[in-house]
Image (tube, rainbow, N blue to C red):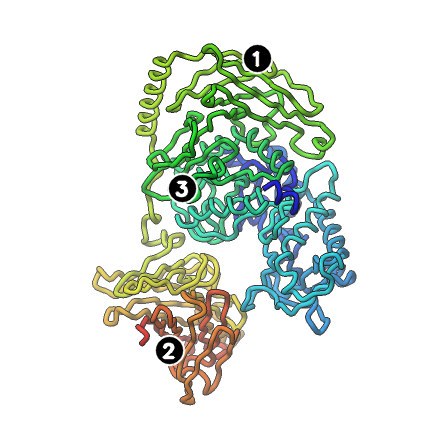
Amino acid sequence: MTSLSRAIGTVSMPPKWSLGYHQCRWSYDSSDKVLKVVRTFREKGIPCDVVWMDIDYMDGFRCFTFDSSRFPNPKSMVDDLHSIGCKAIWMLDPGIKKEEGYFVYETGSENDVWIRKEDGSPFIGEVWPGDCVFPDYTCERTRTWWASLVKDFISNGVDGIWNDMNEPAVFKSTTKTMPESNIHRGDADIGGVQHHSYYHNVYGMLMARSTYEGMAKANTDKRPFVLTRAGFIGSQRYAATWTGDNLSNWEHLHMSLPMVLQLGLSGQPLSGPDIGGFAGNATPKLFGRWMGMGALFPFSRGHSETGSIDHEPWSFGEECEEVCRLALLRRYRLLPHIYTLFYLSHMKGTPVAAPVFFADPQDPELRKIETSFLLGPLLVCASTVPDEGAHECSHKLPKGIWLPFDFGDSHPDLPVLFLRGGAILPIGRPIKHVGEASLEDDISLIISLDENGKSEGLLFEDAGDGYGFTQGNYLLTYYVAELHSSVVSVKVLKTEGSWKRPKRNLNINVLLGGGAMISSHGIDGEVVHLRMPSDSEVSSLVATSEIEQKKRLEMIKPIPDIDEPAGQEGAELSKIPVDLKSGDWLLKVVPWIGGRIISMTHLPSDSQWLHSRIEINGYEEYSGTEYRSAGCTEEYEVNRRYLEQSGEEESICLEGDIGGGLILQRHISILKDSPNTVQIDSSILARSVGAGSGGFSRLVCLRVHPTFTLLHPTEVVVAFTAINGSKQEIYPESGEVVLEGDMRPNGEWMLVDNCAGLSLVNRFDPSQVSKCLVHWGTGDVNMELWSEERPVSKDTPLGICHQYEVRQTN
């Protein structure tokens, strides 16, 4: 790792507050909501240092702007946050709205900073604000221009910046990014003028660099904090990294640790996942278990998408809330150690979280472990399966002495902690945010003696921000402990840095095994002596500790083992996915955001056909020709719900108000007489169109927009017979294909997976469908049905009724 760090650089020393817990959610859409969330953390005694603002704060998704109605005075809001010990981080994306009069677009155009197409004109791609241009961060003048915007932005009370969508992401693109043929006018020292294919992998890192440099210019006495989604080797010099938009499931909980460890091995020690999962709804046990492990990752942030259930620590019941409180208090007690590890990483390039085999590289079995990790000499052993807590799992330990301990916080849903023999672990007092700590606070040392009765450890202390430590303004303490003649002596071996040792108490805890320990206290900087008990006394203390530990665990009220929220009736349906299960199918419907179908499982083949997040994709419908027009995000009411067991077909009828007196009605059913078939009958209805319009609505088009997942992306094709009788096959390399007139499918088309031997067949009435559209994405495909476009009245609704089934392919 030292050789790698010499080549790519080490992590920038993070501000200490950034190592606390971060709370984020896409939907903190007003100052009032942000302040309410943070105040709730304080009221409930749950530690938190940072709250994050997603794109909700912007004026029409325009970067460097604030929505004047929902965030009227961001500086005042941040001042309120600072008064209760919380920092604020704000998102900035690379996509800049192409709009005359918008100051970022205007100044960017004046400075000629946009990425170009091959014909020399600026590339325009659609992202959140609509049509966007994209800064060419490969140019020094672009980085300088962006840094100046960031510098001005900081004056609003911005403590940190979140660079998202910086692959760069582009909507309505087969590759989900910009064309490789686009032109960058890069600096000569990094490659000069090149196509986007040359610079794509470093684009996100260069954006993070520009953001970092802007923050550094804004305040030379503070360390910038930047988080980036896209990065490259060397990104750790400018930004932290999170592992991307994950899912709220046990598989992604399990995956999060190997991803963090691999980033650390690649030179990026400051990383972590979205705790609880970004997309979908966590269960109480999943969220609590994820917090237990995620609270000990180098970067610890909870984040979730809009449209999902609330994912704050108190959102899953009192048992989960208590686990989250314990997990985060544990993190904050360990912050002196974690901060020291970051100092070592900054100086030497060592990872903060390391694989277990680092403790014994000669043991090949340790390389298979994916549920445990090292924080220096501290071994964290977790469980990522719902039916076993960490204390019930069998954990393989590296060779040598590894003694268990806790902070009186053992819980079935928290990881088990071990300290390597020969190590001294510095810890602090329980605090709710970093600003509560003081250099005069008591310091505690947890000591695990090695085979020779010796231990050593480090503690790095400085101002927690700024660059004084580079001038020697810090205190690095080397503690040692040694057993001699039944007495353990603990002292300071040496120190580095110009700081004088503050007057404070020193608490000593020597581990004996089985969670037992002996304790003493003294003054930091002076020698502290402890008498070791005899062997028989140690055995008794260990046995007693193990019995008490078992009793404590048995008395703890565990987090309920709930797979899904209970109750699917009446008004409760508004926030609970509805299951439709009958015959060959299991569907999950989300009434509260677009009435969309988010899961479509064919039971006989155990195949999932929909590609979805809660708020986007899956099966959705629009009321216009525009992408994501009215109909796909509104809250739908459940008018009728029929259950198969009551003698009816399994079905649900939904209605959503799409404005202008119009209703989008959708009847989803698994047919009683044809249980291999899902039928969707949708209509745009005029309920209360004004008389001044002659009883007719605006122009509408029913656009059916399902996003199907590709089980085997290289082995799929959309096949059909056209109305003109020709056989047609559309492959992924076609990108987007529009089918009109006689080229439309003659009432049936199918998504064929040649590898799986399965076809998803979609049948419809051609008289209801004026156009079909195929759009291939990365790992998914849209097979859209469009009605004609016309006004509707009470007597002339607009509808499409169609069906899906899965067939075996010969």
Q: Is residue 162 left or right of residue 214?
A: left
Please identify the quarter of the rendering in which residue 168 is found.
bottom right
Q: CA distance from mark 1 to mark 3?
A: 41 Å
Name the residue: 60% across, 47% down. Answer: 227
**Label annotation for residue 527:** 1
Name the residue that disc number 3 marks.
365
Camera-near label (1 vs 2) is 1
- The answer to whether residue 70 is visible is no
Name the residue that disc number 2 marks.
764
- Circles 3 and 2 in contact, beta carbons < 8 Å: no
Name the residue type under label 1.
Val
- The answer to whether residue 492 is visible is yes
Q: CA distance from mark 3 to mark 2?
A: 56 Å
Label 1 CA crowd tier, 10 Å (few <14, some 14–19, many 20+): few
Label 2 CA crowd tier, 10 Å (few <14, some 14–19, many 20+): some
Label 3 CA crowd tier, 10 Å (few <14, some 14–19, many 20+): few
Q: Is residue 93 left or right of residue 146?
A: left
Name the residue: 61% across, 34% down. Answer: 344
Q: Give the percent coordinates (x, y) of residue 210.
A: 70, 51
- Circles 1 and 3 in contact, beta carbons < 8 Å: no
Which quadrant does the C terminus fall into? bottom left
Q: Give the percent coordinates (x, y) of residue 753.
A: 38, 71
- Looking at the picture, tell me which residue is in the foreground, 687 or 104: 104
> Of helix, strand and loop, which one carries label 1?
loop
Name the residue type under label 3.
Glu
First in residue order: circle 1 vs circle 3? 3
